[in-house]
Amino acid sequence: MVSSGEVTRSRSGRGMVTAELAVAILAALSLFLLLSWGIVLVVQQLRCEDTAAAVARQEARGDRVAAAVARAQAPDGAAVRVSRRSGQVVVRVEVTVQPFAGGRLAVPLAAEAAVVPEPGGLGR
């Protein structure tokens, strides 16, 4: 036989598992979105670094055509700046990444590469 105290306890806890499951699903979804966004940032940073290194190498060789091809590998919306200082070719790639289209949060990413120019480069 079931006492009245046991019936009251089972009714008051009714739906508790559903609420806990809903909170756990939302927490897992939020964590997934944050991790995905982190991966996007890492990939974009690596693309900036690869572009800066490739453009710097080609500019140091004096190969403007290959440098233009390397610039095309930059992330969308990236600014690629080439300067010569202290006997080096310095390339800086900057891009601002937004997590969602039209989002207010923006993360600026930048990479820089410096290479000593080759003597008697192709474009000279």
Image (tube, rainbow, N blue to C red):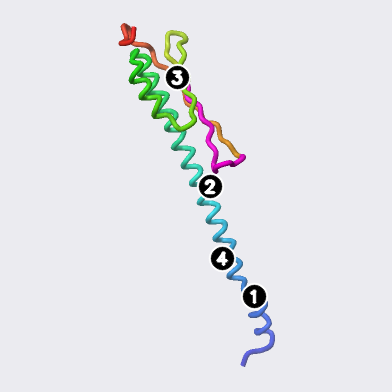
CA separation in Å, label 3 and label 1: 63 Å
Q: Secondary structure at mark 2?
A: helix
Image-based side of 6 in relation to 99, left or right? right
Closer to the chain start, of discs 2 and 3, is: 2
- Label number found at residue 34: 2
Instruction: State which mark lies toward you, 3 or 4.
Output: 3
Which label sits on residue 91? 3
Residue at left offset 53%, top offset 55%: 29
Marked residue nearer the N-terminal end (1 or 4): 1
Measured in 3D between alpha carbons, the distance from the residue under mark 4 to the one under mark 2, in whole angstroms, is 20 Å
- Chain-order first, disc 1 or disc 2: 1
Identified by mark 2, the residue type is: Leu
Classify 10 Å Cα crowding around label 2: few (below 14), some (14-19), many (20 and above). few
Quarter of the image where one finds residue 4: bottom right
Q: In the image, residue 47 lies at what x, y percent?
A: 42, 32
**Mark 1: amino acid:** Gly
Q: Amino acid at mark 3?
A: Val
Residue underneath mark 1: 13
Residue on which the image places disc 4: 21
Q: Tell which tag, 1 or 4, sits nearer the viewer.
A: 4
Dot 1, crowdedness within 10 Å: few (<14), some or many (≥20)? Answer: few
Q: Residues within 10 Å of mark 4 (few under 14, many from 20)?
A: few
Disc 1/disc 4 C-alpha distance (Å): 14 Å
Q: Which residues are magenta?
A: 92-104
Q: Earlier in the sequence, mark 4 or mark 2?
A: 4
